[in-house]
Amino acid sequence: MLKRKQVKKFLTITIEQKPQTISRKKGMTREVQSFKLSYAIHKQALTLARELRQHGITSFISNLAGTEISSREIITWYRRKNNVEEAFHKIKSHLELRPVHLTRSKRVKAHVTICTLAYFLYSDMERR
């Protein structure tokens, strides 16, 4: 996971094996292998400064060029997208939208509509 996050640029990580003695019931003890994780931050000014300039910066690209929509509105829409994704997750998992064993498109649409209405009721009850 650390390789995937490219942490080696900033940190030197060492893992030490540390045996631990655990007491069990009836006075018995057992030795378990544990690990101690320690790190050191690299002080390479050029690399660190370049990375810090980009740290925490997020850019939003929109297809609404030339319209009178403020950047604040776009960020608000982005933050609200989590609510939509959570709603779909709840519909799929808690309300068991899937599997759909229907073949006619009208029946599939009716099934999805009922599940969506059930989610609205569920969220309204949760809110109250």
Image (tube, rainbow, N blue to C red):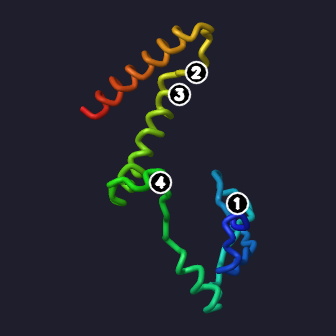
**Would you name the residue on which mark 1 appears?**
29
C-alpha gap between disc 3 and disc 4: 28 Å
Task: Report whether 79 appears left or right of 126.
Answer: right
Sequence order check, earlier mark of 1 and 3: 1
Determine the image quadrant of residue 38.
bottom right
Instruction: Check disc 3 and give the amino acid type.
Output: Lys
The 10 Å Cα crowd at callout 4, few under 14, some 14 to 19, many 20 or more, is few
Q: What residue appears at the point 43 percent right and 51 percent down from the top-left corner? A: 64
Instruction: Check disc 2 and give the amino acid type.
Output: Arg
In the picture shown, does residue 77 fall above or below 18?
above
- Numbered label attached to residue 50: none
Could you say where residue 18 lies in the image, as x and y percent from the top left? Answer: 72, 72
Instruction: Check disc 1 and give the amino acid type.
Output: Thr
Q: What residue appears at the point 44 percent right and 45 percent down from the top-left corner? A: 82
Say what secondary structure mark 3 lies in.
helix
C-alpha gap between disc 3 and disc 2: 6 Å
Sequence order check, earlier mark of 1 and 4: 1
Q: What residue appears at the point 69 percent right and 79 percent down from the top-left corner? A: 9
Could you say where residue 76 lies in the image, as x and y percent from the top left? Answer: 35, 53
**Would you name the residue on which mark 3 appears?**
92
Question: In the current view of this chain or complex, which residue is farthest to the front?
Answer: 66
Instruction: Check disc 4 and give the amino acid type.
Output: Ser
- Numbered label attached to residue 62: 4
- Numbered label attached to residue 98: 2
Q: What residue appears at the point 53 percent right and 22 percent down from the top-left corner? A: 96
The 10 Å Cα crowd at callout 2, few under 14, some 14 to 19, many 20 or more, is few
Say what secondary structure mark 2 lies in.
loop
C-alpha gap between disc 1 and disc 2: 50 Å
Could you say where residue 121 lies in the image, as x and y percent from the top left? Answer: 33, 23
